[in-house]
Amino acid sequence: MATLLLVRHGLTEMTGPVLAGWTPGVHLDERGRKQAADLAARLAPVPLDAIVASPLDRCQETAGAILAGRDGLGLQTDERLGEVRYGEWTGRPLEELTKEDLWKVVQAHPSAARFPGGESLAEAQHRAVSAIREWNDRLGSEATYLVCSHGDIIKAIVADAVGLHLDQFQRLQADPAALTVIRYTELRPFLVRLNDVGGRVDDLLAKSGRDSDAPVGGGA
């Protein structure tokens, strides 16, 4: 099936110290705008059939930078790819949240974690993965498309693709403006790259290597 380029939004003033969640009006800061521009330059040679983003400003701006100069392509928005709805945790400092009992559940048993006044991580994974599967079907088996989303959402999508239980998804990492690539085939998805913040993109240009067989021995 399709090749999915997953991009986390660039840095904002809140990234790191505060759990931004669905806080409105969180924009890329100067660092984030540079990250988005640098990533856009790296991906410029890669033909894209669609660019889809979370509705939150930081993702819209990151995706917009990648979209710039791609004539005939528009930015599409899918709310299912928005940030986890953290409910009452939204906007609180992470240092404060680490003292909550729920923090240990989020770290060790995330499939059981439900945020007060928000959603569970399992629900967030379900909606995001459902969105990806729908976009794969809509765009077709030869498509290469980009989705700009959020750290926990990207990790949840990757966990599903590699058959990793949600309780293990904290072993994954999705840094700001990092690129993760999943190639979906009829038999299985392949994780092509994870949390790439500076690699080449040559292997994303070829349409070959999209069959379902994994190379025995690792391949060349």
Image (cartoon, rainbow, N blue to C red):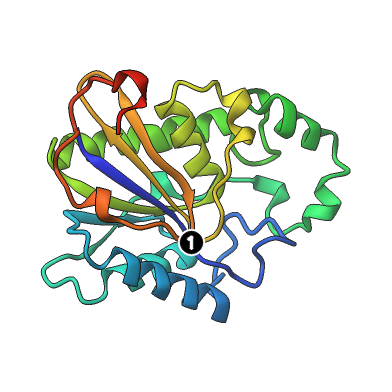
- Residue 51, x across and y down, in percent: 26, 57
Up the image or down, 191 lies above or below 18; here it is above
Horizontal relation, residue 115 to residue 67: left or right: right
Q: Quadrant of residue 40?
A: bottom left
Q: Quadrant of residue 4?
A: top left
* Residue 184 appears left or right of 167: left
Q: Position of residue 176 (x, y in %)?
A: 54, 60
* Relative height, residue 99 to residue 184 (above, below): below
Identify the residue shown where x is 29% and y is 21%. 214
Q: Quadrant of the N terminus?
A: top left
216 is higher (above) or lower (below) than 54: above
Toward the bottom, the furthest residue is: 30
Front residue of 160 and 180: 180
Amino acid type shown at disc 1: Ala
Q: Locate the C terminus and report the quarter of the image it occupies.
A: top left
> Farthest right residue?
99
Residue pointed to by mark 1: 177
Q: Residue 15: where, in percent of width, then height? A: 64, 63
Can residue 29 be seen? no
Residue located at (72% from left, 49% from top): 89
Inspect this view and state whether residue 58 appears.
Answer: yes
Q: Quadrant of residue 134?
A: top left
Callout 1 crowding tier (Cα within 10 Å): few <14, some 14–19, many ≥20: many
- Direction from residue 65 to residue 44 in the image, left or right: left
User: In the displayed structure, does residue 96 sit left or right of residue 158?
Assistant: right
From the top left corner, tell me how far across and down residue 131 is, in percent: 33, 38
